[in-house]
């Protein structure tokens, strides 16, 4: 029996063009390769380091490529022929001004060529003056419009030649405008958590929704064992970068929250601390702890792909709210047929809100 060349210890079933053997069709699907790619905490390739020549901040994985090609490396130093400075890009000169001054000093024109150049310059300058005189527009009268911001309630005076366009502007700055939009969007019912909104492969297993295949492994394993697992219905608020958010946990077993993650990020710590502060117990599981559960399910159900465990989704016949076309979906709450229609639908809602607020103002 030949083992996988990527270090997982399983039997090699496929051979690639480079001669290496693997347990799966793609080397990225190998369990050992997944662990190495998702271990962000202890991975040295994602640490920041500095170049010893130019002191540039880089990832450790990019340092070996940067240092041999660095322009301050003694092997790569090139100096300008005009000012004798070090060249960053280029072969002979550090800038276009140096190249022009160097070449113009060594260039000699005859009297005939000098006369031709002078005539051409005069023609071009005269044409530019004519075009400038034609392009001058008549000056419009400016009027002062007073606008009150609905967020900070400050008064702003705006000079404009078109006072009708100022009705659309209801805030004093970009920060207030973003807050104003967020308030209006929340009033319309947009935003928040929605099933199937991410890019992962989601579905239902025995009537319980899973937003990723990692959640499917955890759910199928614990249902087969007979543990009292259920979808967590909590909504925990937390603050990230000065803005309020809500955290929706994955599962709950015996009053303990279980969060399934593919890899570590800083937001994980913020969410876990928020749940602990509200008096709940939480455990975060990564791919390392899910691999034995996956092997258990493979031995019992004998599937080729984990997606085979998903239930056959019920098809609901629905009509898109934007394009009025009929479509089929397994989601009960879906009202739009595609992402393009959802974006256009949201834009129409925003335009209506802004136009209604301008009329009231």
Image (tube, rainbow, N blue to C red):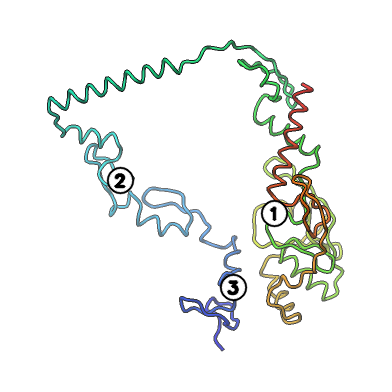
Marker disc for residue 90 = 2
- Residue drawn at the location 24% of the way across and 40% of the way down: 84
Say which label, 1 or 3, has the lower sequence index: 3
- Residue drawn at the location 75% of the way across and 67% of the way down: 216
- Residue drawn at the location 73% of the way across and 20% of the way down: 148
Say which label, 2 or 3, has the lower sequence index: 3
Q: Nearer the viewer, residue 184 or 33?
A: 184
Q: Nearer the viewer, residue 255 or 338?
A: 338
Dot 3: element: helix
Q: Is residue 59 left or right of residue 224?
A: left
User: Circle 2: is it few (<14), some (14-19), or many (20+) Cα within 10 Å?
Assistant: few
Q: Is residue 178 left or right of residue 356?
A: left
Check if mark 1's residue and mark 2's residue have beta carbons within 8 Å.
no
Task: For marks 2 and 3, give the CA distance.
Answer: 44 Å
Residue 351 in picture, x, y percent from top left: 72, 33
Marker disc for residue 269 = 1
Q: Which residue is mark 3?
A: 32
Q: Is residue 159 left or right of residue 153?
A: left
Indicate whether 344 appears above or below 359: below
Residue 177 in picture, x, y percent from top left: 69, 30
Residue 93 in picture, x, y percent from top left: 26, 41
């Amino acid at each position: 029996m030949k083992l996988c060349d990527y270090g997982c210890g399983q039997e090699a079933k496929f051979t690639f063009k480079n001669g290496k053997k693997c347990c799966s069709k793609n080397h990225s699907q190998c369990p050992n390769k997944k662990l190495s790619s998702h271990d962000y905490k202890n991975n040295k390739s994602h640490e920041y380091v500095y170049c010893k020549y130019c002191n540039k901040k880089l990832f450790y994985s990019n340092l070996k490529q940067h240092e041999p090609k660095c322009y301050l490396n003694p092997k790569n130093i090139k100096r300008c022929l005009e000012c004798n400075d070090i060249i960053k890009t280029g072969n002979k000169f550090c800038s276009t001004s140096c190249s022009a001054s160097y070449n113009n000093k060594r260039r000699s024109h005859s009297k005939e060529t000098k006369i031709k150049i002078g005539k051409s310059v005069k023609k071009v300058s005269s044409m530019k003056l004519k075009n400038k005189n034609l392009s001058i527009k008549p000056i419009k009268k400016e009027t002062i419009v007073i606008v009150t911001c609905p967020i900070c309630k400050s008064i702003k005076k705006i000079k404009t030649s078109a006072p009708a366009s100022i009705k659309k502007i209801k805030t004093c700055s970009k920060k207030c405008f973003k807050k104003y939009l967020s308030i209006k969007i929340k009033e319309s019912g947009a935003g928040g958590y929605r099933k199937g909104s991410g890019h992962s492969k989601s579905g239902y297993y025995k009537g319980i929704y899973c937003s990723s295949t990692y959640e499917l492994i955890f759910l199928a394993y614990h249902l087969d064992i007979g543990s009292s697992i259920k979808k967590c219905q909590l909504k925990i608020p937390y603050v990230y970068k000065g803005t309020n958010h809500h955290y929706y946990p994955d599962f709950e077993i015996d009053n303990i929250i279980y969060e399934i993650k593919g890899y570590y990020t800083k937001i994980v710590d913020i969410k876990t601390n928020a749940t602990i502060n509200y008096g709940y117990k939480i455990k975060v599981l990564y791919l390392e702890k899910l691999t034995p559960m996956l092997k258990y399910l493979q031995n019992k159900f004998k599937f080729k792909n984990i997606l085979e465990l998903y239930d056959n989704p019920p098809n609901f016949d629905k009509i898109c709210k934007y394009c009025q076309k009929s479509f089929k979906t397994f989601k009960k709450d879906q009202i739009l047929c595609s992402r393009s229609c959802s974006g256009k639908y949201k834009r129409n809602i925003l335009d209506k809100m802004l136009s209604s607020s301008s009329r009231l103002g």
